[in-house]
Image (cartoon, rainbow, N blue to C red):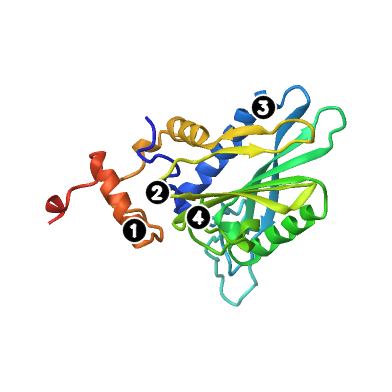
Amino acid sequence: MPSPFPGMDPYFEVSSRWSDLHQRLITYISEHLQPQLRPKYIARIEERIQLAAFDQRYVPDVQLLHTLREPAPILELATSVTADEPLLVTTLDEAVREPFIEIITRESGDLVTVIEVLSPANKIGQGREDYLQKQNDLMATDVNLVEIDLLGYGKETVLARNAVIPKPTDWRYLIDISRGGRRNALEVYAIPLRERLPNCRIPLRPPDADAVLQLTAVFNRCYDVGSYDLLIDYSQLPEVPLQAAEAEWVQRHLQEKGLFPAQEEQN
């Protein structure tokens, strides 16, 4: 069953749903591009690992719990006292695993293009600083960078944050392309909530033609395979920041789909 939205579904912007969608997007973007890249290029899924500070958590807490196998040693006291058995708690460094896609040449293994799908961790705190550093490092090379930001909140992080985008004025999502040999000409897709996701250019090495990423088709595949229609309650507005016009459009659009109760039904 497809998503009720023509493009990005804002109900996935909440962190509890984003992680699963993000993994699927990376997987199916790679799957979608691979036939266009063969036999000269290969799309690979790579992963960054970022440890989170104790005061800045991006993922649910993870701890290992187990009981001690042998009684805990006790001090000899005047009277015999037996200590209660505690749980031994092994704390783990919290890690944010951020998958991304690299397109490499088959013959030499040279890195040609990096495709990033931004997560909430890329848009706040140290995670944002680390991402911006990687962004800057790539800008000093001839590697193409494609950034896909489908989160309508958080600090602006993609390269297009420095660009003036005159239209459409109501864009919510940003995709930009920075070509290795043409850094001063940033290609931008600015997407309002009400519109489909674009068919994006994915640059390779000149003179090879760009691959084309049909992002709406990829998102719909994620939605269908993930059975997200069974998980999302569309009878309430999504728990993410929306502009007033966006909230009004979402409600009206879902009412037309028969998923959101009419005003009289809510009273």
Q: Position of residue 200 (x, y in %)?
A: 59, 39
Q: Is residue 72 above or below residue 146?
A: below
Q: CA distance from mark 2 to mark 1?
A: 16 Å
User: Counting residues from the N terminus, which is met first, the one under dot 2 or under dot 1?
Assistant: 2
Residue 235 showing in the rendered view: no
SS for tag 3? helix
- Determine the residue positioned at 80% across, 47% down: 181
Quadrant in the rendering for residue 239 = bottom left
Tell me whether circle 4 and circle 3 mark residues in contact (CB < 8 Å): no
Residue 258 vs residue 180, the one in the foreground: 180
**Which disc is residue 167 wearing?**
4
User: Counting residues from the N terminus, which is met first, the one under dot 4 or under dot 1?
Assistant: 4
Q: Quadrant of the N terminus?
A: top left
Furthest residue to the front? 166
Q: CA distance from mark 4 to mark 1?
A: 16 Å
Tell me whether circle 2 and circle 1 mark residues in contact (CB < 8 Å): no
**Which disc is residue 245 wearing?**
1
**Which disc is residue 11 wearing?**
2
Crowd around label 4: few <14 · some 14–19 · many ≥20 (10 Å)? few
Residue 76 vs residue 26, the one in the foreground: 26
**Which disc is residue 34 wearing?**
3
The amino acid beneath tag 1 is Ala
Q: Position of residue 37 (x, y in %)?
A: 71, 27
Crowd around label 1: few <14 · some 14–19 · many ≥20 (10 Å)? few
Q: CA distance from mark 4 to mark 2?
A: 25 Å
- Position of 145 with respect to 238 (left or right) is right
User: Counting residues from the N terminus, which is met first, the one under dot 4 or under dot 3?
Assistant: 3
User: Counting residues from the N terminus, which is met first, the one under dot 3 or under dot 2?
Assistant: 2
The amino acid beneath tag 4 is Lys
User: Counting residues from the N terminus, which is met first, the one under dot 4 or under dot 2?
Assistant: 2
The amino acid beneath tag 3 is Gln
